[in-house]
Amino acid sequence: MKNKSLKALPLMLPLLLLTVAAQAQDAADGGSNPYFYDNFLFWSLAALAGTVIVAAIVALFHLLNVMVKVNQIRIFQEMGLEAYEKEVQKAKEPFWDRMYKRWTDAVPVEKEQDVMLDHDYDGIKELDNSLPPWWVAMFYITIAFAVVYMTYYHFTDAGAGSAEEYEMEMERAEKAVQAYLATQANLVDETNVTALTDAAGLETGQNIFNANCAACHGMLGEGGVGPNMTDNYWIHGGDIKDIFKTVKYGVPEKGMIAWKSQLSAADMHKVSSYILTLVGTNPPNAKEPQGDLYEPQADAVEQPAADSTSTAAEPEDALGMNK
Amino acid sequence: MAQVEQFQYDNAIVRKFAYATMVFGAVGILVGLLAALQLVFPALNFATAETTFGRIRPLHTNAAIFAFVGNGIFMGVYYSLQRLLKTNMYSKFLNEFHFWGWQAIILAAAISLPLGITSSKEYAELEWPIDLAIAAVWVAFGVNMFGTILKRRENHLYVAIWFYIATWVTVTVLHIGNNLEIPVSMWKSYPVFAGVQDALIQWWYGHNAVAFFLTTPYLGLMYYFLPKAANRPVYSYQLSIIHFWALIFIYIWAGPHHLLYTSLPDWAQSLGTVFSIMLIAPSWGGMLNGLLTLRGAWDRVRQDPILKFMVVAVTAYGMATFEGPMLSIKSVNAISHFTDWTVGHVHIGTLGWNGFLTFGVLYWLIPRIFQTQLYSQKLANAHFWIGTLGIMFYSIPLYWAGWTQSLMWKQFTPDGFLQYGNFLETVTQIIPMYALRAVGGALYVGGYFVMLYNLVKTIKSGTFQAYEAAEAPARVATAGAHKGEHWHRWIERRPVQLLIGSTIAILIGGMVEIFPMVMIGDQVPKIESVKPYTALELQGRDLYIREGCISCHTQMVRPFRSETERYGEYSKSGEFIYDRPFLWGSKRTGPDLHRLGNKYPDSWHYNHMLDPTSMSPGSIMPVYPWLIEDDLDNSLLPAKIAVLRTLGTPYEEGYEEEAIADAEKQAAEVAARLRKDGIEGDNLEQKEIIALIAYLQRLGTDIKPAPQAGN
């Protein structure tokens, strides 16, 4: 045992030196760091302390070894040679075998007659093996866990309750989002949004539309529960800025969801732009126009004849979506 | 020495329960397979009320737990009890009453659940008349068991019988406690407790139904049939004693782990957590005593299919009882709860522990009572491997699905949005896993039919021995302690004291948790704006219960950013004070509904119930055309109002007289809104869908700011 510990020493020393070197490297990186020498001093002391600890461990092992030997000698003196040899044999048993025996404390199958109880239930016998020590230890650990847990959360103010935990989570998230947004320039909002025209953006917009909007506005924008998006009549304005705003904040009292908590600004930008491309597509089963006629300023879309003649009648709104 | 007496073991009752086990096992797992397939192919709901998932799922759980495992318990108890006590059963009449009574209850469940007659409380769905019948049959079983114990020839009670006794007393207490309800009619009742209190009592019951119906009686069976089959002595008597008492004492406390992060007060949640953790060792005590009993017999495990089944059963028990406490740690539960992880977890227990132990017992017992050999060891081995593979294919995909879905629910984009804002995305993602799970289920079913064939062949080749001659010396009652005996021997000679001791052990936990919740008012802070449901909303709520919406939808927004972002403000205990029963649910196959009110127009709900895919393309929710075709039955409404007022809901005096008119008035308003959206239909205002919409639009709105009128 003594030899083993001594062999470990040269192994440990380079390891220790390695950590010191790594720290020195860190310090060197910050070459201009005025605290370099403070750190150097600190790490030198730490290295010294480490060496002392290793030396202490070696000494303790040595001491332990001596104690084992002394015990064996005592056994020899008190109980004779046979007991001594048995003891020496036990010490030679591999560590894991000894641990296994200690922690299971099971009487081997060959010797089970020694712990056979005189119970006999319809031929079923019972052994009197003791409780497995590892099992008992586990039981105690779980009980200790319970005591610590209840103390931490309920008998002291240390642990956060569910509601408090939630507040903390929201605060952390808010900070993280703000920090992220600070790194993002030119965020799109309803004041600066312009209609996208690139095919990729519009295709994403279409996917978003199909997944989220089609349920109420129809797969082709023809309308359904919600109003028709393919005509030139808009309840809340037909400009890209208006559409973006309607998507973003919704019209909750009429059933239109505010999407700002579910779609990012970029996604709302894409879907709003896609919606604009639906105007004038004349899908089948289109819902009757609702809202006010909106004339696009620049690239005027030709207006369906039917719509231009029906402006006189206030468009009827099945959902109560007109004011 | 006392004189040796001759008597006969009654195998006829054992055979009856064995047959019932074999038949209802097939029913239970086939219905389960149907439910699994419905999640992959919604068309398998057949657009018919009786075959729709929400009604099929409770049918599956009840058939598997009470019909299959229930009959399995009785089969094993009636076989082992007589032999462990060296006597025949106390009363032939009670044998028959117990058997036929239990089968009648199963029949009643099989009819009433598809009809939508349900209390909606998980594993306690059956309505009050059936509850009473269960109580009567259970008491008959108890009398028969104790009668047998009292006339025993064996002086001491073996550990298996301790477990039988604890099972009997605890199931009695749980069944009564969780079914305190006041009838409205023959097939409708409301529970005495509401909201949070109802939730706590339900999961005190639900958790301990697992403990004392699926676990303790099966531990009793293990303690008899495993040493018998292995022909080995039980490993440790001391371990039996400690793990028995620790198990029954600690188990009862752990119920609140089903309600972590809900509106249940934190102190109760914490008790659920810590007692679940402390449950690991007592549970493993049973596993260890089972597995270590096989020391010296492991060479036989390789050949003997019976031992194989038992080894996997006990191992599955050990795995499930370690996983359970892990799932009770709040941070793990935050991931697992409401997902398929839980479903995977319970099926390790049911398919592995209960299923495989039952199979082992059947393979062992049937040849014995038919005085023959098992028809084919080869087929039994085949069953073992198919079944084991089935369990793997069942559970691994569900663990995967649970993790995947939970992580998707919680995923935020860096700019603070839910990555998967549309709940449906998180469902379509895991449908392949649902398909694999159904494959696992099909394998398990396949193995089961291999067993049935094997057992039927065995039965045909043997001759049944209805009465098996036995002899034993008469019991000489001994008073006082025997010198040098273990202290626990004392109580093993005294069944009454053992009964009282286990009753005290199982009462403590429940009392400590339930009494303060029910008796101390400030456990549930009042919210001024929370009002009782209107007559029509109440009717809609009862439809929600009837259709088993709770099978897939929760009504409990937990205090997580990912949930408040998706659903709205987290649920408060004060919101549920008029909820009889509570409808928090335990699984989100679809999204949470607690803040559903005012989220969509009425017409959205109408179209969605008619065909969910019209509003949510790709949805796996079944269609509910009958809600649109059938007229709402308001005849019970006055009685419902009266019962709820008796229970404490502050309906004005005389409201029951106006209730029907009030419901019709509100229905007309809903119908008018639907018509405005272009939904046609004769007598639209009289249809069931109207009441359901009224209820759904009310959900969670008591503390949600109402949308402002105008623009």
Image (tube, coloured by chain):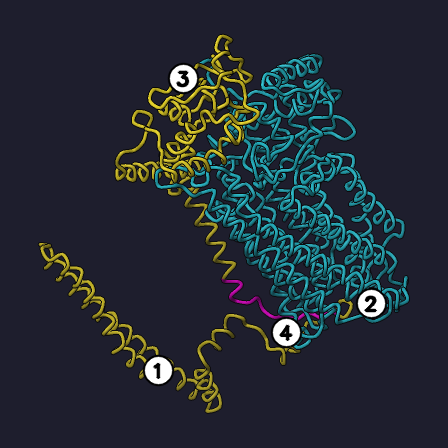
Chain colours: A yellow, B cyan
Position in image of residue B539 (x %, y %)? 67, 24
Q: Where is A76 relative to B214, above or below?
A: below
Disc nearest the viewer among 4 and 1: 4
Residue A132 part of the magenta segment: yes
Q: Which mark is residue B367?
A: 2
The crowding category of the residue bearing disc 4, from other C-alpha atoms within 10 Å (few below 14, some 14 to 19, many at least 20), is: some
Residue B129 falls in which quadrant of the image?
top right
Viewer-proximal residue among B512 and B137: B137
Identify the mark nearer the N-term, 1 or 3: 1
Q: Do residues under tags 4 and 2 come within 8 Å of each other at their CB atoms?
A: no
Figure disc tally: 4
Name the chain under label 1. Answer: A
For numbered disc 2, what is the local secondary structure? Answer: helix
Which residues lie in the magenta part? A124-137
Measured along the vertical axis of the image, is residue A84 above or below residue B180? below
Determine the CA span between mark 1 and mark 3.
93 Å
Residue tagged 3: A294
Near-viewer residue (B377 or B298): B377
Q: Pick out the residue farthest to the bottom.
A: A81
Which chain is disc 2 placed on? Answer: B
Q: Position of residue B110 (x, y in %)?
A: 78, 42
